[in-house]
Image (cartoon, rainbow, N blue to C red):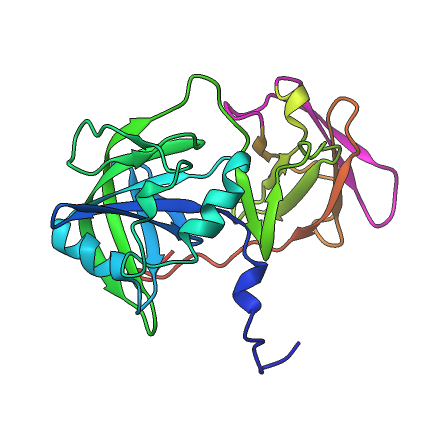
Amino acid sequence: MTRDLPGDLWKKLTSTVGLVVTRHDGTVNVMAAEWATFVNKQPLYTAVALGPRTASRRRLEAAGEFSVTLCAEGQAALADFAGSFSVTDIDKTGSDLVRLGTPEATATPWVTGGVLAVECRLRETVALPSHTLCIGEVVAAHLPDEAPRPLVKHGGMHTLGAPVRRTDVVAAAQLRPDGTLRVAATGPAAEARAPWQVTLLPPDGPPVRLGAHPPTPHGDLLADLPLPPAVPAHGLRVRVERGHATPGTATVSAPRPAPTTGAPR
């Protein structure tokens, strides 16, 4: 650990490159934004962080709208090109790789061929020390007939690998102020409807089964269970199992003190 932050620490971020299109003064420009993401679900907002010398920031603010295309893996060359030149250098839309779609809710076109394209109306700008965060509300979305795999930016540009195969149950347990035991766990989605098995592991003595418990609507476990009267409340651990997954274990933590009136939760 160091207090001297490396200058390229931001390259540890993993993201999907966004192609940001602006339309202003009768001209259209496309630029690549490595920091493009959704920041609100309902209504759906997206945000792009634009640097201080980016001409698209001024164009975007003047137009009050923009579009973002999340790049597919086949658009690595286009993302590199769009991020290498400014609209003040050249009209990038003349490239054969820049294919623009017709907007439906704004006057700003969008780049076709990506994982997703959205038209946005600018709702807010947030001035950061070097960059400006431009936040827009999504007012139209364009999805391809067949979803391509995304282009992944992590330092360099990468393709998306195979899905991670989850095999482990992850669990936590905590005593509640009323003396019950709250147990939470997640596990492989393939067994999302199977019941959860919870077992107490006292520091001295044999394991104590606390039975089978149904999953939540999301397939997880969140249950408040009574402690058997003969089991001491200190030094406890739990084991949570489901199906063929590797069981999860956890130390039972002490109950949190009740919040005082007006205290934040």
Residue 21 is situated, as x and y percent measured from the top left of the image, at 28, 44
Q: Residue at x 62, y 21 (%)?
A: 192
Q: Where is residue 5, by image quadrant?
A: bottom right
Task: Please say if 244 is above or below 168.
Answer: above
Say how many tags the image has.
0
In the image, 10 versus 78, the foreground residue is 78
Q: Where is residue 210, by image quadrant?
A: top right
In the image, 87 versus 44, the foreground residue is 87
Extreme residue in the right direction: 205
Q: Residue at x 40, y 36 (%)?
A: 96
Residue 204 is situated, as x and y percent measured from the top left of the image, at 87, 48
The boundaries of the magenta stretch are 193-219
In the image, 210 versus 7, the foreground residue is 7
Extreme residue in the bottom direction: 4
Quadrant into which the C terminus falls = bottom left
Residue 86 is situated, as x and y percent measured from the top left of the image, at 33, 59
Residue 25 is situated, as x and y percent measured from the top left of the image, at 11, 50
Does the magenta run of residues contain 218?
yes
Quadrant into which the N terminus falls = bottom right
In the image, 137 versus 23, the foreground residue is 23
Q: Residue at x 13, y 55 (%)?
A: 62
Task: Please say if 56 is above or below 214.
Answer: below
Does the magenta run of residues contain 208?
yes
Task: Please say if 245 is above or below 252.
Answer: above
Q: Is residue 38 visible?
A: no
